[in-house]
Amino acid sequence: MKNVVILISGRGSNMEAIVHTAQRERWSARIAAVISNRPDAAGLKFAQTQGIATAVVDHKAFETREAFDAALMQAIDAHDPAVVVLAGFMRILTPVFTAHYAGRMLNIHPSLLPSFPGLHTHQRALEAGCQLAGATVHGVTAELDHGPILAQALVPVLPGDDADRLSARVLALEHQMYPRALRWFLNDELEFDGNRVRHRMGESQLFS
């Protein structure tokens, strides 16, 4: 059985969506652990109620980013993961870390990449006058918020939208898209050709 390790920094709503979907669909993979860089991350309590192992690697306890990443890798590798899932994990990872999990680490970003990498994506989309916003599930590389795109969610920008209203609609689609993309990855349903990713059976990789 393939193991999944999920990294969070806060409430972990995408982590919750993955856990619930895995339970409902009876995945052959299992969520082996949820790890956070913040001891007060609310998502840890949810994971514990589900019987999932949890751990904290507090980034504040380390003098360098490299030392933190080394400790985090040790905590992750204790669970022998087939895939590492970033679900609101708010740390920039070192090239050594991303190389260690190359080809088996996923992230979700709240924009239609390659547009608006980094923070404050919804506000930036509004200020740019975008008619569409959304989110992207992608493979993680050393370059921030880049990598092969597994799936994208599209949300229209509505009159009167502010960042909070837009974010809420995007998040609702994230909760559908991320578990589906992770299941595809675990079941080897995706074909990678550089940055191009195709579902082997032609299932739509666009959510709206």
Image (cartoon, rainbow, N blue to C red):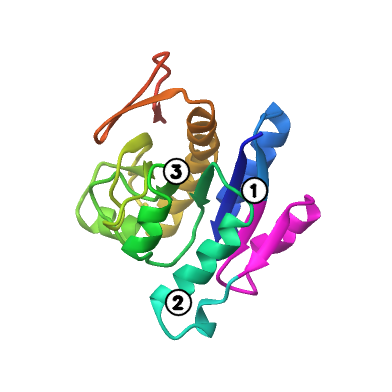
Query: The residue under label 2 is which amino acid type?
Result: Ala
Mark 1 or mark 3: whose residue is earlier in sequence:
1
Label 2 secondary element: helix
Residue furthest toward the left? 128
Q: Determine crowd level at label 2: few under 14, some 14-19, many 20+ residues with C-alpha closer than 10 A.
A: few
Disc 1 crowd, CA 10 A, few/some/many (<14, 14-19, 20+): some
Magenta highlight on residue 157? no
The answer to whether residue 136 is seen in the rendering is no
- Asked if 35 appears above or below 203 in the picture, the reply is below
> How far from the left and from the top, in percent, is residue 68?
47, 74
Q: Earlier in the sequence, mark 3 or mark 2?
A: 2
Q: Nearer the viewer, mark 1 or mark 2?
A: 2
Q: Are marks 1 and 2 in contact (CB under 8 Å)?
A: no
Report the span colored magenta. Answer: 33-56
- Relative to residue 4, is residue 195 depicted above or below? above
Q: Residue at x 72, y 35 (%)?
A: 23
Q: Which residue is mark 1?
A: 16
In the rendered image, residue 176, in percent from the top left (x then y), is placed at 53, 35
| 162 horizontally vs 171: left or right | left
Mark seen at residue 104: 3
Whole-Å distance between the Cαs marked 1 and 2?
29 Å
Q: Which residue is mark 2?
A: 67
Apparent side of residue 33 relative to residue 76 in the rendered image (left or right)? right
